[in-house]
Amino acid sequence: EVQLVESGGGLVKPGGSLRLSCAASGLTFNNVWMSWVRQAPGKGLEWVGRIKSKTDGGTTDYAAPVKGRFIISRDDSKNTLFLQMNSLKSEDTAVYYCTTARELEDWGQGTLVTVSS
Amino acid sequence: QSVLTQPPSASGTPGQRVTISCSGSRSNIGSNYVYWYQQLPGTAPKYLIYRNSQRPSGVPDRFSGSKSGTSASLAISGLRSEDEADYYCAAWDDSLSGWVFGGGTKLTVL
């Protein structure tokens, strides 16, 4: 059974940075493309970005609202996905989910990021 | 404003059949598979329908999906109280090079 466990969320001031992690188990992590999806309080789902497997180039793609501020990376030796969030804005406040990326089939439980002064 | 368009709400009584629509464009639904997710209150989204009409193991056959052109729909037959949830459609968008979602439909079982 695939398990994805996010961590690292919390309260951060506008303009600050935060790094989220997603620990994966039950899958061959180095073969899997991974994504981040977020959900603002009371709102719908919004795709943040993805990272391909290293065998497929390891490249990243980002949604327009976060491009240039967020960086997705992975450590295949630790089966862990990361989301480095910089220059945070109040509109980045959301629950952040990590998901498997090809078809968004497996989801973690999410971690809440609150951007507020 | 979401790229895919869903009605904000839907409702039905136990045992009824309800459908939820999802409208997109050539660059997303028109060119790629449609996926549906169920989000129960306070939980993460769950993979409900993939590749337009396929059900993952464990999803009851009361749930079905279809696609035609740039639109898709999710049908739930034999409605049950535990189906009360938010439902989202999604597809890859070739123009945006990213996943796009509908705004979500809140299903109420009366």
Image: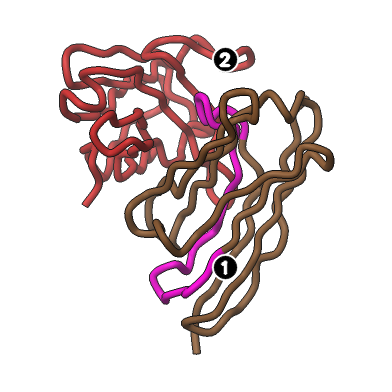
Where are the magenta residues, as a range?
Answer: A85-106
Report if residue A100 lies within the magenta region: yes
The front one of B102 and B73 is B102
Q: Is residue B20 left or right of residue B81?
A: left
Q: Residue type at mark 1?
A: Val
Residue B56 circle label: 2
* Dots 2 and 1 on the same chain: no
Q: Can residue B84 be seen in this view?
A: yes
Instruction: Say which of marks 2 and 1 sits in front.
Output: 1
Q: How crowded is mark 1: few (under 14 residues within 10 Å), some or many (20 or more)?
A: many
Residue A113 circle label: 1
Q: Residues within 10 Å of mark 2 (few under 14, many from 20)?
A: few
Q: Write down the chain letter for disc 1.
A: A
Q: Residue type at mark 2?
A: Pro
Rendering coords of residue A28 (x, y %)? 76, 24
Q: In this view, does A83 lie to the left or right of A78?
A: left
The front one of B11 and A70 is A70
Residue A29 circle label: none
Mark 2 secondary-structure assignment? loop
Q: Quadrant of residue B64?
A: top left
User: Which residue is located at x 45 percent, y 64 percent?
Assistant: A69
Q: Are marks 2 and 1 in contact (CB under 8 Å)?
A: no
- Chain A, chosen colour in render: brown
The front one of B65 and A54 is A54
Q: Which chain is tinted red?
A: B
Q: Is residue A45 visible?
A: no
Residue A40, compared with residue B90, is above or below; it is: below
